[in-house]
Image: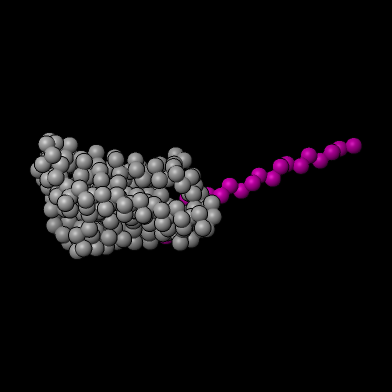
Amino acid sequence: MSTASAKPVAKKKRSSRIPLTYVVALVPVAAALNIVGGQINTILKLPIFLDMIGTAVAAIVLGPWWGALVGAITNIVSSFISGPIGLPFAVVNVVGALVWGYGVRWGLGKKYWSYFLLNIIVAFLCSVTAVPIYVFIFGGATGHFADMMTAAFLAMGQNLIVSVFSSNILVSLADKIIAGFVALAIIEALPANLTANIQLPAAAGGLKKVLWIAGGVIVGAAITLIALAVAK
């Protein structure tokens, strides 16, 4: 008597590749979001940057190097609109993209507290990257609000590098926390197949999601108020 051995049916693995049409659509939109945010910041003279929200969205959804492309495009295009001052800072936008993109893929996007920590790491590494550009290319000032804080720290007796880092880290913390949580809200509005393979904390529930996103923005705003106080 022969017995037929049934082969196990292999489960079809869901592809983690994002269709090229989504990539082609999202990269310019994310870059435009950065450019518009930067222009709003310039017009209103805000004590943050607002030019990396799109970078965070692209880096988290598409991948770190797509985010880096968005960051580079942002600063290149902005240099034609607002002048070449922002061009050397393209490397800062690229660093932010790589940290956001790889950070989420290495598990820092699983929980709200770890995602909050990821934004702080982005802020720190962006500041470490930006300070040499401020000091050695622009002499410590670029006309941004942070220059007033730099002057305040210099008046306290700190040297130029410490003063520039102290002012930039305050601005960067506020900016990257706001950017990271606004990006999280934008990502939630994207089609589900774009985010199906990304481990993000937003799956934890509607009210909790709203509270964390709002809380992140409020923390960023609070740091902005501290920066304003230091500059006075």
Is residue 97 visible to us here?
yes
Q: Quick one: which residue is furthest to the right in this view? A: 1
Where residue 141 appears, x then y in whole percent? 12, 47
The residue positioned 29% from the left and 40% from the top of the image is: 124
**Range covered by the magenta-colored residues:** 1-21
Where residue 211 appears, x then y in whole percent? 46, 55
Q: Nearer the viewer, residue 197 or 23?
A: 197
Quarter of the figure that contains the N terminus = top right
Q: How many discs mark residues in the rendered view?
A: 0
User: Relative to 215, is 161 on the left or the right?
Assistant: left
The picture quadrant where one finds residue 47 is bottom left
Q: Nearer the viewer, residue 139 or 162?
A: 162
User: Relative to 124, is 83 on the left or the right?
Assistant: left
Q: Nearer the viewer, residue 45 or 88?
A: 45
User: Relative to 50, is 25 on the left or the right?
Assistant: right
Q: Is residue 230 magenta?
A: no
The residue positioned 36% from the left and 55% from the top of the image is: 217
